[in-house]
Amino acid sequence: MKKFVSIPFKYLLRKLFAGEHSAFFDNGIIAPLLALISTLPMLNSIFTALQTAFAKEDNLYKQSQAAFQTPEIHTLHDARVAYFNFLWDCVNIIKYKNDPSLTNAIARLEFLHHTYVHLPGENYYDMIGTMTNFLQDCELPEYHAALQLLSDAELFNLIKIVAEAKTANDTFKTLYHERSIDKVHVAALGRLTALRLDVDDAFVTFVDAVNIAWTSNELGAKDPDIRQHLVEVKDIITAAIQEAQLTLSRRGHHKPKDDGKEDEGTQTPDTTPPTPPTGGTQTPNTDRPAAPPTEQNPTDEPHHLDPNEHPAMGE
């Protein structure tokens, strides 16, 4: 019999950053299910175990992030975003001069902006790598010449704005990495990884219980209320997974295939080693070579979940 909940989620558990993993369970799974679980007593104890495991992870995650949410860090982050946005505001203003001698330079810079248009919305660490790549691109001859030409138009000194953006990013990077290598913080991250394993295990157990409850009801009592409530549980789980898949797709990760095959019982274990994380890179752009990867974010480190430890639902 095909499993009721048949959605592969191992990939998500392995690839989600720490904050995304926390939001997946807090906002996507636990909060929406709180009231619904009371109508399904057969799931109460297993759901409570999932809540307990997540509470430990969530508490440590918030402690871990506290060092990176100080006013100083926040101000430096806002500064580099402000310089980036101001640069393109200036380009847009110059564009409306309708000066034919500037048309090609503006078009070249607009192409560069398109490549990095999502930069302001990235998290602290990812923006270090993306902003660094952007600033390096600004030094390439074709873009530097365009910036210089628009600067000579005597409206805005775009070269100076880029230099200020580089200073702001370097200052943020220095302080951020000082916090990242703090021994206490690194130890906390190690504990956080272990707690994520516990939460993932509890989630696998919960989903298995949902599948068992569905099969039991369909082969036995066929209670319409239980059926409806289990359908609602499935919808919540599916919505959370789809939202996480969308988050990963924005970073360039491909959605795992759900082939829809019937559950065939024992399957041959997957011996393929997990794909190494590639966090900290920008989404590849098909119009230009991809930017070089940056070092892994110690505070948003993806959890490396062994695919063999957690059988996916219906895979």
Image: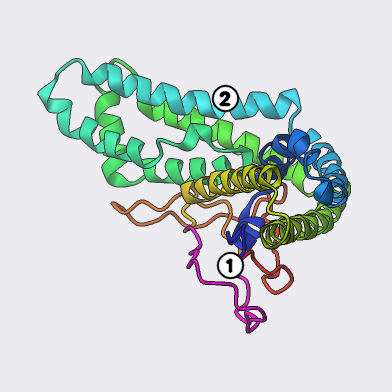
Which of the labelled discs sits on residue 79, or is there none?
Answer: 2
Look at 47% across and 58% down and name the residue there. 254
Displayed quadrant of residue 273? bottom right
Q: What's under tag 1, amino acid-wise?
A: Lys
Q: Position of residue 85 (x, y in %)?
A: 44, 25
Which of the labelled discs sits on residue 2, or is there none?
Answer: 1
Q: Is residue 201 left or right of residue 238?
A: right
Q: Is residue 265 above or below residue 280?
A: below
Q: Is residue 315 left or right of residue 95?
A: right
First reached walking from the N terminus: tag 2 or tag 1? 1
Look at 65% across and 60% down and name the residue there. 14
* Magenta segment main secondary structure: loop
- Asked whether residue 157 appears in the rendered view, the answer is no
Residue placed most toward the observer, 100 or 81 = 81
Residue 269 colored in magenta in the image: yes
Q: Which residues are magenta?
A: 255-275
